[in-house]
Amino acid sequence: MQQEPLRVEMEGLEALNLEEFPVVGDFVVELSYSGSETLLSFQAPSVDMSVSFPWWNHGLDEMISWSPVNFPCGSLREPFWDRDQGWSLLIWLVGDRVYIAEGDGEEDVYERWFAVPLDRYRSEWRRAIAKLSESAPG
């Protein structure tokens, strides 16, 4: 899905028209373990988008004990924010939807953005963590 880049500062999220965000009902959280790394990505097949976390730094032992309060999510005024070389991410909750915006490194510009029903976001995290726990070494 081709989108116009979203240009917004974290402090300006309240000005966004959230109705423009495509709502993704087939959202998937993918977690895997490779060597000493826990790998994470979000998939949104219906809008042909993928969000990868290139330097996810949470260990396996930590993640398999997570509950919904640990899932990456912030608020409209204080979104979850992550940034690294050539990559940036915002995640925030409004009502019953989680909004996700990913950029390719340009400050305050997000090339991929969509919303996920809160129940789906949480159930996908629970499913992915359970699957990761089952395949954990030892």
Image: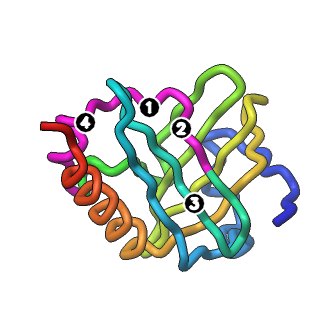
Which residue lies at the image location 73% right of the left edge and 53% below the top edge? 112
The answer to whether residue 137 is left or right of residue 101 is left
Q: Residue 43's mark? A: 3
Camera-side residue of 110 and 40 = 40
Which residue lies at the image location 53% right of the left edge and 38% below the top edge? 53
Relative height, residue 29 to residue 8 (above, below): below
Q: Nearer the viewer, mark 4 or mark 2?
A: 4
Alpha-carbon distance for marks 4 and 1? 11 Å
Q: Residue 60's mark? A: 4
Q: Residue 53's mark? A: 2
Relative height, residue 95 to residue 128 (above, below): below
Q: Amino acid at mark 2?
A: Phe
Q: Which residue is mark 1?
A: 56
Instruction: Tell whether position 53 is magenta.
Output: yes
Instruction: Tell whether position 56 is magenta.
Output: yes
The residue segment tinted magenta is 51-67
Q: Secondary structure at mark 3?
A: strand
Alpha-carbon distance for marks 2 and 3? 12 Å
Residue 10: image location, x then y, percent: 61, 40
Q: Amino acid at mark 1?
A: Trp
Which residue is most to the bottom?
25
The answer to whether residue 23 is left or right of residue 64 is right
- 3 or 4: tag closer to the N-terminus: 3
Alpha-carbon distance for marks 4 and 2? 15 Å
Residue 66: image location, x then y, percent: 20, 48
Q: Where on the picture, by quarter, is residue 62?
A: top left
- 4 or 2: tag closer to the N-terminus: 2
Q: Amino acid at mark 4?
A: Leu
The residue carrying pointer 2 sits among few (fewer than 14), some (14 to 19) or many (20 or more) residues within 10 Å by Cα, namely some
